[in-house]
Image (spheres, rainbow, N blue to C red):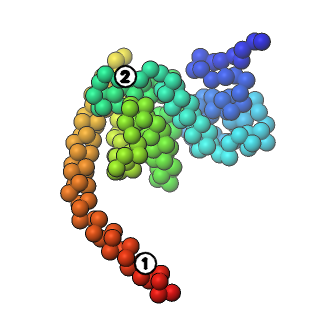
Amino acid sequence: MEKAGKDDKGASKNDPRERIVDALMALAAEKPWEEISLADVADRAGVSLAQFRDFFPSKGAVLGGFSRRIDRKVLEGAASTDESAKDRLFDVLMRRFDAMAPYKAALKNINAWAMRDPLALPSLNQLALNSLRFMVEAAGLSSEAPLGALKLQGLALAWTHVFHIWLADDSADSSATMAALDRELARGETLVERAEEARRRLEPLAKPLIGLAERVFSAVARSR
């Protein structure tokens, strides 16, 4: 049986979902995000609007599909095991930038739109959180550890800062991106250590309050 063909970015040409993602990213490289209609994407992907709707409800959902494609490419790569946690995360995130490199022109236009539309930022932040949760796990760290949500949001903010530097980094070795990522991860490591220390100090105080609250709720429940 003949294998499904793949384009130079690794997406199956026979999968309409992947063709839709390819179409959106190609169009995003050509013109502003606001000027891309759903019909434009469907036409470029070679699917009907009805088929498009079956697979994705919006352009934002297609962008989520693109993010998952990048996640998958990074997660399929070999993970480092003999480095520090910071170095492992650095390696994973640089591999993510490498995977996004063929789409940089599109991502520049998408980022320009996001900077013009504050309502887009919460959705893009959630998209980053969804991806970074897996990047953290790929680095051998737990995204569910104490203060996990706080750590993940801090990493998302750091990622966004470095992402903007990456967009403008045209060097062959991505030196500006690497330097910025190293600084952000070092700063984040320090902040996490401080947060962990604060949590450890406050934990003994929190337990009596939790116990008191449980007793109050139990008393209220019995009185009903």
Query: Which sits in the foreground, 52 or 172?
Result: 52
As helix, strand or loop, the secondary structure at mark 1 comes to: helix
Which labelled disc corresponds to residue 76?
none
Q: Is residue 24 above or below residue 91?
A: below
Q: Is residue 204 above or below residue 77?
A: below
Please identify the quarter of the rendering in which residue 94 is found: top left
Query: What's the residue at 44%, 20% (across, down)?
Result: 78
Which labelled disc corresponds to residue 218?
1
Side of 155 relative to 55 (left or right)? left
CB atoms of marks 2 and 1 within 8 Å: no
Cα separation, mark 2 vs mark 1, equals: 50 Å
Query: What's the residue at 71%, 40% (across, down)?
Result: 55
Q: Callout 2: 10 Å neighbours few (<14), some, many (20+)?
A: some
Side of 12 relative to 119 (left or right)? right
* Type of the residue with mark 2: Ser
Query: What's the residue at 69%, 22% (across, down)?
Result: 13
Q: Is residue 211 above or below residue 176?
A: below
From the top left corner, tell me how far across and down residue 92 is, in percent: 40, 28
From the top left corner, tell me how far across and down residue 116 is, in percent: 47, 48
Query: Which sits in the foreground, 10 or 79?
Result: 79
Quarter of the image that includes the N terminus: top right
* Type of the residue with mark 1: Ser
